[in-house]
Amino acid sequence: MKSFKNSAFARFFTNFPKIMFANLLYTIPSTICFAIFGLIGYLTGFQNVIVWFLGIIPAYPLYAGLVMVIRKIAIEKEDINVLDTFKTSVKDNWKTFLINGIITYLIVTLSVFAILYYYSMASVSAVYSALLTLYLFFSAMLVATMFYVPMMNITYDIKLLQVYKNSFILVFGKILRSVLTLLAVAVPTAVAFFAIMLTSNVWLLIAGILVSLIYPLFYTYIVVSIISKPLQEAVGSFTKKDDRYVVLPKERDIEKEKKLMDENKDSEYVFVNGRMIKKDKWFFNFITTYKKQKSSHYGSFCYI
């Protein structure tokens, strides 16, 4: 019973005021950003997703704050100052999240165009139906990849390109968790979608406001709660201390890396120096380094 009270599920309700406050710190400015670009589209007559979704870019740096607050409350089980934690995370990660915002904007915009096009052409040819199915699968993989990116950005000291590579690998390396997360977020997403599609006039306005203010909270809390365990298993724990992941020194510790290999013997990938790489590639580098260190000890190269 004690463990349940301290679970991420229970902490959602016991810490709801704090989580909601963090959510509002993100959603209110984000809603304003989307409203501005919606107004620009209306005034210029250029009303489509290319303009409407531009709000993602300036709003995304604030998402770093929401993810950090939820991570602290749901996973690390800390009693935090929400405003300070939110501001610090945004300050530390805004540049990276701005780039993430641009990437997310491109993914969302291109996906919407492609899906709508293939859907409209599906009745013309079976080829388009097949392409639609294929692109829906591809889009699901991109969405699953983006589950891991924000958490990895705020938690580990890894280059952005490596973050995306690691995130894509985790989608398949932790496929059950990835699918579970997709199914879990599908519920609030479907509710939000139908709330907007099935309403009109003043009710549409109310539904739009409620969705924009509440949906990010449920989406982010679900994602962070489900992916944190596999992320820590694959990359490194962040629940014991708040320090960012510290990479191994340039002068590699063979014994430490061998221990790391043993700990990850059931996984196809191993995490070394902030990079997730296949074991066969890592083992080749490991043996090469070992031979070089051994040869330098004897003053000449040796070959195994």
Image (tube, grey):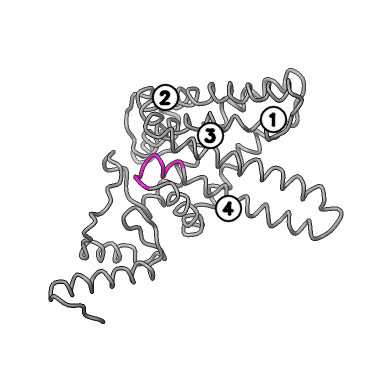
Looking at the image, tell me whether mark 1 or mark 2 is earlier in sequence order: 2
- Which residue in the protein does label 3 denote? 218
Which one is earlier in the sequence, the residue at label 4 or at label 1? 4
Mark number, residue 195: 1
Amino acid type assigned to the residue bearing label 2 in the image? Lys
Amino acid under disc 4:
Met
* Residue 206: x %, y % from top left: 67, 20
Q: Disc 4 vs disc 3: which is toward the camera?
A: 4
Q: Are marks 2 and 3 in contact (CB under 8 Å)?
A: no
- Mark 1 is on which residue type? Ala
Which residue does the numbered mark 2 point to in the structure image?
A: 18
* Residue 136 among those drawn in magenta: no
Q: Which of marks 4 and 3 is nearer the N terminus?
A: 4
Q: Say which residue label 4 marks.
A: 141
Q: Position of residue 87 (x, y in %)?
A: 38, 25
Instruction: Compare residues 65 and 251 and report the one nearer the observer.
Output: 251
